[in-house]
Amino acid sequence: MALKTRDGKELLIEYSNQVWQCDHTQVDVLLVDSEGKLLGRPWLTTIIDSYSRCIMGFHLGFDAPSSTVVALALRHAILPKCYGHGYGLHCEWGTFGRPQYLYTDGGKDFRSQHLEHIGVQLGFTCYLRRQPSDGGLVERPFKTLNTQLFSTLPGYTGSNVQERPKEAEKEATLMLTDLERLLVRYVVDNYNQSLDARMGDQTRYQRWESGLPAVPDLPTERELDVCLMKSTQRRVQRGGCIQFENFIYKGERLSGYEGTQVSLRYQPTDITTVWVYRLEQGKEVFVTQAHAQGLEGAKISLYEAKAAQQRLREQQKSLSNAAILAEVERRQQEVVNTKKARRKQAQADIGGTWDEPQPTITADELAPENPIEIPPVKVWNLDGEI
């Protein structure tokens, strides 16, 4: 079996899992913020292994498709993935490594020099699909996710205007973190562990394992920092401090770079740690990790930080690491209390137990003691749902 590229080249995928495909879709679920305000529908970017059809990794967020979003999805796919007890997983997300080829459509985000640079740094080649119909392999999982997961969730909008429930906006209660947990659980425990009719009695994950030519070769964390994380420019201040998003960061050896312009690499899901680089002879060279002072062990996303800072400004309070952390923790506790009240009310409404997820209950309420039982993926022999 082969995939044809736009220039007519063929990439053999029958006996190897070194060809990955990437694509985007907008999720048909409305999400809310921590205040309960409607945010809209997030974007999902997935990385699919062509040989096994495993979902190797993804990126879920409100940023529109771009090379940066593709890079973050690639980072997730390449690295080994480990999730805590709160996700309520029964299996491990065992796929990782790096591809030889990344197969995409001709969108602007896939034709960028940024993505080509990532390919050069990590040792894979980017190819464009010859025609849109060649993207069926990476698009089919979106249909399965929509049918098996998204359509069961509160705030589901349907795949078109005619299907949109009248109460979709009122029923929306999930936050981005809730949807991310549900998506991870579905991919790990259901999708990658399901049989595919084209693979005989192998699950997708078993197929991935059987196609490994060797132990997956991993780039170093430093390589991934340079290529796959968001970045911004800052100047090192007196005492070796760096200010970013109103946090003060300190790192080893930074005091020797006072006044120097540096590049910060960071993950939007947790900005308590940043990676510091400086430009030397046209190349970015790693300097050190820098940590937000007083926030050791904490995990604060860029969104949470911005929301906490806004609330502090409204209260006319000064911004500091401690104040921002306290505000984030205060709001998180409010959300937990609200969810507990919703769960108690839901249990009372249905006699104390339930078998299916209720419209007003989110992932945090259900995991791990009452995990959502997502039905297994339906497998068909045809080109439809898999």
Image (spheres, rainbow, N blue to C red):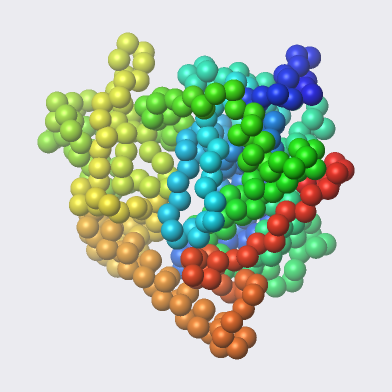
* Location of residue 84 in the rendering, given as x and y in whole percent from the top left corner: 43, 54
156 is higher (above) or lower (below) than 48: below
Question: Residue 66's image quarter?
Answer: top right
Residue extending furthest left? 239
**Between 312 and 353, the one nearer to me in the picture:** 353
Horizontally, residue 251 falls left or right of residue 219, namely left
288 is higher (above) or lower (below) than 26: above
120 is higher (above) or lower (below) than 374: above
- The residue positioned 38% from the left and 38% from the top of the image is 266
* Location of residue 99 in the rendering, given as x and y in whole percent from the top left corner: 58, 25
Observer able to see residue 30: yes
**Between 231 and 386, the one nearer to me in the picture:** 386
- The residue positioned 18% from the left and 26% from the top of the image is 257
* Location of residue 144 in the rendering, given as x and y in whole percent from the top left corner: 73, 51
- The residue positioned 75% from the left and 68% from the top of the image is 165
- The residue positioned 51% from the left and 38% from the top of the image is 76
**Between 357 and 111, the one nearer to me in the picture:** 357
